[in-house]
Amino acid sequence: MEKQQALKFRQLPGHYAIIRQDSNSPVPAWATEGDFISITRTADELSIVCPVDHVPKEFATELRWVCLKLEGPFPFSQTGVLLSFIEPLSNNAIPIFAISTYDTDYVLIPQEHIERVLALLEEAGHESIKD
């Protein structure tokens, strides 16, 4: 088996919400503000990731997410980046929500798992960068 890649990552400040809307829903203004947001529309849905404190009560969810940013950029030719990061989590039944951008990957983890996640990632050889 190939050795896993050792990656550096940082935890973004705050907590995030993941909201699903109908595919034909307009993008709400509250979803477009913050240092990290992701809005994806497909034929099936409108997915919104944004700071939890921006979400109005009628869309609020009790589940809060912590966002981990992999320190990229990673060339498109580099394979296994996301796999090496999430495999130790998957092997330990930790749910994730992954978002990829041109330069890097973001992995959202339910808040209640973050301490265990940080320990598992360190054990797998990944390094948490503190600001």
Image (cartoon, rainbow, N blue to C red):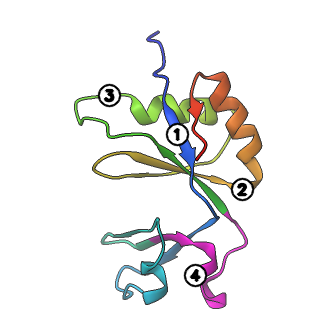
Closer mark to the observer between disc 4 and disc 3: 4
Secondary element at tag 2: helix
The answer to if 115 sits in the magenta stretch is no
Pointer 1 residue: 9
Q: Which residues are magenta?
A: 48-64
In depth, the one of 90 and 109 nearer the eye is 109
Q: Earlier in the sequence, mark 4 or mark 3?
A: 4
What residue type is disc 4 on? His
Residue at 50% x, 74% y: name it: 20
Pointer 3 residue: 79
Q: Is disc 4 in contact with disc 1, using a CB cutoff of under 8 Å?
A: no
Work out how far the residue at label 4 is from the one at label 1, CA to CA, in angstroms: 25 Å
Pointer 4 residue: 54
**Residue 13 against residue 81 in the figure, above or below:** below
**Residue 70 against residue 112 in the figure, above or below:** above
Work out how far the residue at label 1 is from the one at label 3, CA to CA, in angstroms: 17 Å
In depth, the one of 91 and 51 nearer the eye is 51
Q: Position of residue 83 (x, y in %)?
A: 46, 32
Residue at 37% x, 40% y: name it: 72
Q: Is residue 84 left or right of residue 26?
A: right
What residue type is disc 1 on? Phe
Residue at 48% x, 19% y: name it: 4
The label number, if any, that marks residue 111 in the structure image: 2
